[in-house]
Image: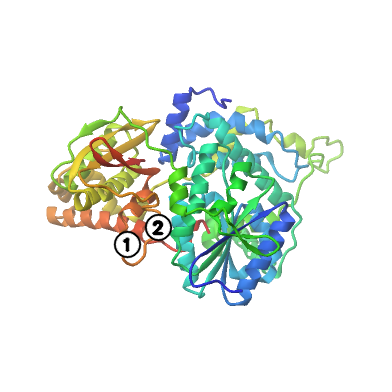
Amino acid sequence: MTSAAALRHSAFVYENDDEYVARSVAFLKEGLDAGESGIVANTRDALAMMRDALGPDADRVSFVDVSATYTRPARAVAAYHGTFLEHLRRAPSVRAVADFQVGPTSGEWQEWVAYEAITNLAYAHLPVWVVCTYDANGLPDPVLESVGRTHCEVLGDGLRERDDFEDPRALVRKLTPEPEPLLELRSFSAGEDLEAFRHLLARELMAEKVPAGKALDMLVAGTEIAANAVRHGAGIEEVRVGRVAGRFVCEVVDRGGGFDDPVAGYLAPREGTGTGLWVARQLTWRIEPFDSPRGFAVRIWL
Amino acid sequence: MRGSRLSAEQERELVVAAEAGDEAACRQLVESFLPAIGGIARRFNTGGQVQRSELMQEGIAGLLFATRRYDPRMETPFWSYASFWVRKAMQELVAELTRPATLSDHAVRGLARVKAAQRAHAQAHGVEPTTAQLAAVTGFTRVQLDSLLAIDRTPRSFEEPLGADEGTTATFGDMVADPRAEKEYEHVLDTMEIQAVRGHAEQLDERERTVLWRHYGLGQRPQTLSEIGAGLGLTAERVRQINKGALEKLRKTVAQPAGGGGAGI
């Protein structure tokens, strides 16, 4: 069974290391035998197990240390996208086994379950079969219960379609908290053009003692959001900045009708799509688009 | 559950600053939590197969990973969140190093290449090479090097005598310092490479960074294009072009995936 022409996103839940290795190796070897490329993403100790188990085939597989990848959902999407494209330069399709990693708080569980939903859309155009693996004994119950909601196929004794799979956009919307009003932000004039906006934003960043390298990230991200406000939002109504919970925040409010796509900026760049929000998400902690009393707002957390 | 003597607000500020790439904040954060990390490390009984300093370094890596994921708006105190990743990092190290490994031919050849590079460097420079230096010479990635070197590890027993001299009673275990001692913490911190998050500015060359930093006043007084040009021997127009080009370069780098390197391979 080879990968289809577009993304397949499956999952399996394992009870122990032996089961994880056996099923992952079988999945990868089937693909390698058919001329596909392979990727394993997991912690270092699990990668070492997989290298041993794959034997000579390990030379044909890339091993991804998840501690470098799973920092923020948008960056994880971008990291995998880059790896898939690299592999697709040398094989017609790719098989990837990626272990789900999550921290100890329920807020984080929601965020990374949303990431799994986003995966269904982010690389939908690529011939990649991603199998996400879930440790039954290491993950919290709410996360294990989400497997069927985010994967339309679960590998058990065979491949079973799930009837609890949810539309990715609807699920992401459900799992994304509503932005709270931030009364502590202060307004400043956006300036006459994007260059003036950057200078004014830079002054605010320096006033808040943001390190130079990070400030540059915000200047680039802020420019993307401001440019969108001018191009699609009938102009900038207001810009507000400040520190909230220690983070530098910039909010750009425009006069347009806005957009209502909870996965905007998460879809990997492809022909015919804009990249402004994708760029902004890569460079920052979080992007929150929402309707505000003064217009459509995009809030950037650095 | 706190893990340091810092107030919640001080912790939060340090975490955000460390995640933003402030090296001083990074170091201060690590120093503040070293005793707590040591407390977790002490609970691992590996029979000498994993050194205490290795557990500490891994724990620090776990702490720094936590800074890249921790949301200060969470009601969870930072250490409650970070201790999970510290413990996990140590568990993964212990699992990796204490697991019996079967060496493939490929691994045997790879390990031989690494050891040859280590010997050559030590002979040429009088010191062991760092991981980065080994990676540059051998062509292996850091992940590959860590795996190969881990396979080669020979565990030492804490009861192993230090010398063959008659009457020697000192053992290897005597040499392992008490991690509660300040000196041990400082040693771990000094030998560890705290990888600062440098941001995407690393994609720019030095002149591009200089122009951007000066033009937007990043960490310094902002300068006009003419002032920057005078300092670099360029016209104001040329500086403007460099500025525009650098911003576009950054944007393009982020918009188009690097491929391969982005996923920590």
Q: Sequence order check: which comes first, mark 2 or mark 1?
A: 2
- Residue B134, image quadrant: bottom right
A101 lies left or right of B224:
right
The furthest residue to the bottom: A34
Label 1 is placed on what type of residue?
Answer: Thr
Badge 2 amino acid: Leu
Q: Residue furthest right?
A: B166
Give whichever of B250, B236 is nearer the camera: B250
- Number of marks in picture: 2
Q: Dots 2 and 1: beta carbons under 8 Å?
A: yes
Quadrant hosting residue B171: top right
Q: Distance from label 2 to label 1 (Cα)?
A: 9 Å
Q: In x, y percent, where is residue B259?
A: 45, 63
Secondary structure of the residue carrying tag 2 is loop
As drawn, the label of residue B113 is none
Q: Position of residue A40 (x, y in %)?
A: 59, 61
Which label number is shown at residue A267? 2
Identify the image quadrant of the N terminus of chain B: top right
On the same chain: label 2 and label 1?
A: yes
x%, y% of residue B101?
74, 58
Residue drawn at x 40%, y 60% as measured from the top left: A268
Q: Which chain carries label 2?
A: A
Q: Circle 1: is it few (<14), some (14-19), or many (20+) Cα within 10 Å?
A: few
Q: Is residue A265 left or right of residue B50?
A: left
Q: Would you name the residue on which mark 1 appears?
A: A273
State the residue at coordinates (67%, 36%).
B41
Q: How crowded is mark 2: few (under 14 residues within 10 Å), some or many (20 or more)?
A: many
Closer-to-camera residue (A23/B181): A23
Local SS, label 1: loop
The answer to whether residue B262 is seen in the rendering is no
